[in-house]
Amino acid sequence: MVHGGAALTGEDDNADHRAFLHVLCHELGTPVASVQALARALARHRTALTPEQRAEALRLISDHAQHMAAMLDAVRVVADHLPRPAPPIGPTQLAEVVRGATDAAGIDDLRVSIAPAVRTVIVDVPAVRRILTNLLANARQHGADPIHLDADGRVDVLRIEITDHGAGMPAHVAATAFRRQTPVGYGPHGLGLWIVSQLVAMLGGSVHARTPLPVGTRIRVVLPLQR
């Protein structure tokens, strides 16, 4: 089932939006303060720093900038999926949705298996593509090749599993991976996967993570299909 409470739409909209903003402020606070401190240090000691120290400072600034860019991307996801008139949707090739997510996640060699029953589906394509993009990017960054995407289901249900072959999440992280309060130190296993859970819940589905043996992490998404 989906962890992390109500989706971004529903009865608890205001409370959930406030909680999201608190998480966002917490996530941005540390890198902003660190970049400010690094900038002051570079300004004061620019001639005293060794080339190695300058290179390390620039690397930290770059890492913080990437982190803040990811947070802003999360805000865009939320904004794009706030309540709005539902767009007309029709049958689409699941392989095309997967291909778009694969390109956006920067994966060159994704091993894809799509069962005949779900090759053509009726889904919210932008939302599903975003879900898959986030999960594939997470697998690429924190897992290891090969990365597999397996899709199957029946006339009214779509199941997608994404499996990597990295070290895998610790069991206690996998159990809480989609909660807002997951420790920030786990990076995309915090806010990033929470955003995935919100989009999945918005579509009436479920998502969970587990660490299969011997290595790797497997994320399963189950979504209802429209006729």
Image (cartoon, rainbow, N blue to C red):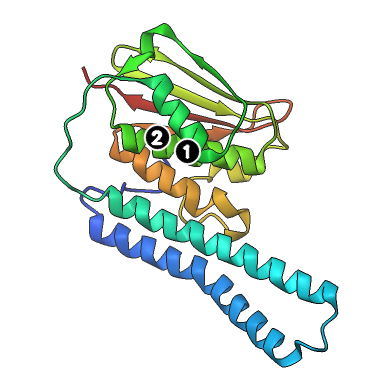
Callout 2, which amino acid? Arg
Q: Quadrant of residue 121?
A: top left
Q: CA distance from mark 2 to mark 1?
A: 6 Å
Depth check, front residue: 172 or 133:
133
Q: Within 10 Å of the Cα at label 2, are there few (<14), some (14-19), or many (20+) other Cα atoms?
A: many
Is 57 positioned to the left or the right of 48 in the image? left
- Asked whether the beta carbons under mark 2 and mark 1 sit within 8 Å of each other, the answer is yes
Q: Quadrant of residue 79?
A: bottom left
Is 99 positioned to the left or the right of 80 in the image? right
Is 162 positioned to the left or the right of 143 in the image? left
Q: Which residue position is annotated with label 2?
A: 129
Depth check, front residue: 163 or 55:
55
Depth check, front residue: 43 or 37:
43
Callout 1, which amino acid? Thr
Residue 152: x %, y % from top left: 44, 15
Residue 137: x %, y % from top left: 55, 41
Looking at the rendered structure, the number of numbered marks drawn on it comes to: 2
What secondary structure is found at the residue carrying circle 1? helix
In the depicted structure, whether residue 158 falls above or below residue 145? above
In the depicted structure, whether residue 13 falls above or below residue 169? below
Residue 1 visible somewhere in the drawing: no
Residue 208: x %, y % from top left: 49, 34
Residue 50: x %, y % from top left: 85, 79
State the mark number for residue 133: 1
Is 133 positioned to the left or the right of 94 in the image? right
Q: Dividing the image into 4 quarters, which one contains the C terminus?
A: top left
In the depicted structure, whether residue 160 falls above or below residue 8? above
